[in-house]
Amino acid sequence: MRVRQRLIQHKHLQYLLCLVFAVAFLHAAVAQSNTTAGMTDSNKQPPPFVFGTASAAYQIEGAWNEGGRLPSIWDTFSQMPGKVANNENGNVADDFYHRWQEDVELMKSLGVQLFRFSLSWPRIIPKGRGEVNQAGIAFYSRLIDALLAAGIEPHITLYHWDLPQALEDEYLGWLGERVVDDFAAYAAVCFNAFSDRVKYFTTFNEPLSFVFIGYDQGIHAPGRCSDRSRCAAGNSSTEPWIATHHVLLAHVAAVQQLRSIAPDAKVSINFNTNWGEPMTNSREDLEASQRYLDFNLGVYADPCFLGDYPSSVRKAVPSLPHFTTEQKAALKKSVDYFALNHYTTNWVSASDSGLQKASTTYVRDGAPIGPQADSEWLYVVPWGMRRLLNYVNKRYHHPAIYITESGVDVPNENSMPFPDVLQDDFRIDYYREYIENAVLAATVDGVDVRAYFAWSILDNFEWADGYSKRFGITYVDYKNGLKRTPKQSAYFLAKLFGRHPNPGT
């Protein structure tokens, strides 16, 4: 899943004036209307892009100690008292490891065209390097074959936050230089096993999230930060930037493996950000909004599309490692499309405090920016989707964009009785309006939007929130055998994309 808003308010980011062209772009964005024509269920024309759903290994698989799998950092972290809501963990999760056939049939019945899932590194190479677990390879191979037989195209993410615990114990995971070679070797195993049937890969899901929440705030695994009341070890000023650099070098090393093994395959990173809307039309707020985007999106996307970190980040973080000339060239050729995770929007204004010199809020003049979801960091702001798509289109030279995560949790959903919980009108409205803005970006603004992946196909383990938050378009009954029941949003999406769902399947 995605980064919490408190990450965006990260106190360790610094200020530098934005480029003039970026200020001009943001000024134009402010002038753009916040209203759009309504998309209704009865529209005859489906969106000009395809319908997918998404998931992640640790969030749905369970079987944490079966089939040769060894612990990940999330297995370790979630066993620590107080780290996850209600002290929950992913030991069983949705039991996808044993019920994947049922879930493939569910997706087929809903007309899902694409399914994005992650591979569990400790299931494939349990100790992080060395011996390959053939049982893990066989599990994912069967899943891929079943998806293809059901007419569903698989999209694979290599890393969705579940680093093998063995590598954390050996050299502190993403803080150690050796992780670059170990990740590349893991990637090569995956590409050799699956690229004959899978065309689309991403190396990392939301590096912004797992790096800064894990190494700055310490709220996610591996739980490192400077605050000793929360973290036993860590340095929030330096470690996130070391991890960031190693993640990008590991991405390049993995892509080089893919180019050699499967040159026709496509690869990216799942970048994530909120849209940062300037609080006012003032130059100061426009510049603050650009800094916000530099630190939240540009820190990972700029190296992959433009060859280096944003200048504002470089100047604000003197300890940030430098890329060699060869590394810059390799980074600039390391993505084939833009994989974008987007959920919400916030206001941004200039600030005298903090390293980023920008403050964020969801409230202006006493009014929220949009309806609040169940999660404290998520407000429904559909127009932010269109503005972000246009920003990505302009800054990164018109890439093909796959919206690889987008979704919402309904207020108080976890306490709703069954079957009332299935009537998720709040979620339906979110998808209708966000997809509408993606359609407008594609058809009116000329943005090359290729797909929209709803997060998530199933209610699942939502990291530090445990099972207290539900993002699924399918209800999972955790008290009654993990029974799956599609919510009305699942049928809405299927019909919207012209997929003719079969509720009886």
Image (cartoon, helix red, strand yellow):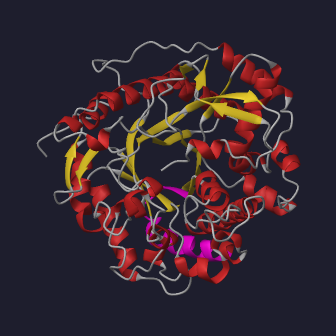
**Closer-to-camera residue (134/7):** 7
Say which residue appears at 29% left-offset and 28% top-offset. Answer: 425
Say which residue appears at 49% left-offset and 14% top-offset. Answer: 36
187 within the magenta span:
yes
Which residues, given as a range, are shown in magenta?
Answer: 181-203
- Please provide percent x and percent y for residue 228: 67, 65
Instruction: List the single residue furthest toward the front.
Output: 229
Answer with the quarter of the image where residue 99 lies: bottom left
| Residue 314 left/right relative to 5 | right
Instruction: List the single residue furthest toward the bottom.
Output: 131
Say which residue appears at 25% left-offset and 55% top-offset. Answer: 103
Q: Main secondary structure of the magenta part?
A: helix
- Please provide percent x and percent y for residue 25: 74, 23
**Closer-to-camera residue (96/350):** 350
Residue 92, visible in the rendered structure:
yes
Residue 473, visible in the rendered structure:
no
Q: Is residue 61 above or below residue 436?
A: below
| Residue 147 left/right relative to 418 | right
Answer with the quarter of the image where residue 298 lies: top right
Q: Is residue 361 above or below residue 331?
A: above
Instruction: List the single residue furthest toward the left.
Output: 504
- Please provide percent x and percent y for residue 72: 49, 73
| Residue 412 left/right relative to 337 | left
Answer with the quarter of the image where residue 337 lies: top right
Q: Is residue 167 above or below residue 239?
A: below
- Please provide percent x and percent y for residue 23: 79, 25
Q: How many marks?
A: 0
120 within the magenta span:
no
**Closer-to-camera residue (232/246):** 232
Q: Is residue 476 above or below residue 130?
A: above
